């Protein structure tokens, strides 16, 4: 019988993995963070299959390196930092980048799926941003990380992160028009099931 780990904090789960190599505890961490991580990677790559492959690579790296996690940041921030580095590695390898979206939906609380033309235009607008701008905007506005957490995940100064987010919002508004909703959680939710 598997233990019920859902009531434990991320920190407690990490300690269980570090101290006892508890695979169930790590499985709970994956369960908690897989959907937002995969959605973040999907938005960066523009491809659900590549995002899933990268997400698996990220969690393998996390498991391999968890002994070195000291809790200076949250586990979530650490995972997104690894994910961003994996994305950059993937991009450098020259894999296909920026494939068109076939399906895109808002976060479950909105319940509305975007029209395919809107989904295409949204992804095209995201792809027009620089990689760091896109990642900063997605982490802050879609995944709900604070500016500090996003700056740490991307290894950039806080002031630079804020600039990336602001510039990204301005560029998205310019491309999508006055109807673009770019407040936190409205852009592209990392809670989206893909």
Image: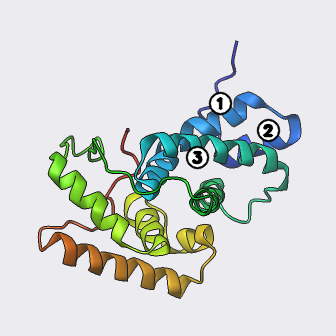
Left of 152 or right of it: where is 24? right
Q: Is mark 1 on a helix, strand or loop?
A: loop
Residue 136 in the image: x percent, y percent?
46, 71
Disc on res. 53: none
Residue 113 in the image: x percent, y percent?
20, 42
| Occupied quadrant, residue 120 | bottom left
Residue 78 in the image: x percent, y percent?
66, 59
| C-alpha span from label 2 to label 1 | 10 Å
Q: Earlier in the sequence, mark 2 or mark 1?
A: 1
Q: In this view, does 49 lie above or below 84?
A: above
Q: Name the residue at the left extreme.
A: 178
Residue drawn 34% across the image and 65% down it: 126
- For disc 3, the marked residue is 54
Q: Name the residue at the top extreme.
A: 1
Q: What element carries label 3?
A: helix
Q: Residues within 10 Å of mark 3 (few under 14, many from 20)?
A: many
| C-alpha span from label 2 to label 3 | 25 Å
Closer to the eye: label 2 or 3? 3
Marks 2/1 in contact by CB < 8 Å: the verdict is: yes
Q: How crowded is mark 2: few (under 14 residues within 10 Å), some or many (20 or more)?
A: some
- For disc 2, the marked residue is 16
Left of 12 or right of it: where is 149? left
| Occupied quadrant, residue 84 | bottom right
- For disc 1, the marked residue is 5
């Amino acid at each position: 019988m598997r233990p019920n780990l859902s009531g434990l904090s991320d920190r407690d789960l990490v300690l269980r993995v570090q101290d006892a190599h508890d695979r169930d505890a790590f499985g709970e961490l994956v369960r908690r963070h897989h959907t937002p991580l995969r959605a973040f990677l999907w938005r960066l790559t523009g491809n659900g299959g590549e995002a899933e492959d990268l997400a698996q690579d990220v969690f393998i790296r996390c498991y391999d390196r968890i002994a070195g996690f000291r809790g200076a940041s949250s586990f979530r921030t650490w995972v997104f930092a690894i994910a961003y580095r994996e994305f950059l590695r993937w991009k450098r390898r020259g894999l296909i980048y920026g494939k068109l979206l076939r399906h895109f939906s808002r976060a479950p609380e909105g319940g509305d799926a975007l029209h395919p033309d809107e989904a295409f235009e949204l992804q095209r607008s995201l792809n027009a941003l620089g990689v760091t701008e896109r990642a900063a905007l997605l982490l802050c506005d879609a995944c709900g990380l604070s500016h500090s957490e996003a700056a740490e995940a991307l290894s950039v100064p806080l002031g630079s992160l804020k600039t990336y987010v602001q510039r990204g919002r301005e560029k998205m508004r310019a491309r999508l028009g006055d109807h673009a909703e770019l407040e936190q959680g409205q852009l592209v939710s990392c809670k989206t099931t893909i």
